[in-house]
Amino acid sequence: GTKGSADLSATIKGRSVKIEIKWGKDRQSQEQKAYQEQIESAGGIYYIARTFDDFVEWYDQKIQNF
């Protein structure tokens, strides 16, 4: 795989979506930050999920705006 790539990758309604899962004190590496920048500059969506509830709320809001 690509160094720094997200934990989950999906295409939702034609858009590239990358989801990085972080738990507790876990933080993004420099490679992950660079990967996020590449995805977002290409028009993709990158999200860091820290709790399942926050992810569900983000997903529901984001999908409504597609």
Image: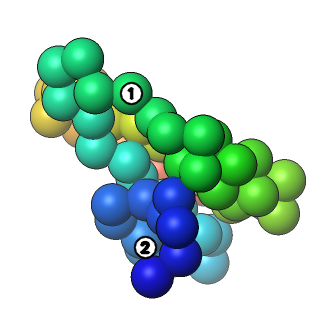
Q: Percent position (x, y) of residue 28? A: 46, 35
Of residues 21 and 11, the one drawn nearer to the viewer in this rendering: 21
Image spot of residue 58 (x, y percent): 39, 33
Q: Can residue 57 be seen in this view?
A: no
Please give the name of the residue rendered at 28% of the width and 43% of the height, measured from the top-left corner: 21
Tell me if 21 is positioned left or right of 33 in this view.
left
Q: Which quadrant is home to the N terminus?
A: bottom left
Q: Which residue is drawn at 53% across and 76% down?
A: 2
Q: Which amino acid does label 1 sit on?
A: Arg
Residue at the location (33% across, 60% down)?
7
In the rendered view of the protein, which quadrant contains the C terminus?
Answer: bottom right
Compare residues 57 and 49 and report the one nearer the observer.
49
Of residues 13 and 19, the one drawn nearer to the viewer in this rendering: 19
Question: Which numbered disc covers residue 27?
Answer: 1
* Eye-nearest disc, 1 or 2: 1
Q: Residue 17 carries which label?
A: none
Q: SS at mark 2?
A: strand
Q: Which residue in the rendered view is the most extreme toward the right?
A: 41
Q: In this view, does 51 lie to the left or right of 30?
A: left
Q: Residue at x 61, y 78 (%)?
A: 14
Residue 26, picture quadrant:
top left
Residue 15 at x, y percent in the picture: 62, 70
Q: Which of marks 1 and 2 is nearer the N terminus?
A: 2
Of residues 55 and 18, the one drawn nearer to the viewer in this rendering? 18
Say what amino acid the circle numbered 2 marks.
Ala
Q: In this view, does 24 lie above or below 44?
A: above
Q: Rounded to the nearest whole Å, what is the CA distance between mark 1 and mark 2?
A: 22 Å
Residue 10 circle label: 2
Location of residue 16 in the rendering, given as x and y in whole percent from the top left corner = 59, 69
3 relative to 35 in the view: left or right: left
Whether residue 19 appears in this view of the structure is: yes
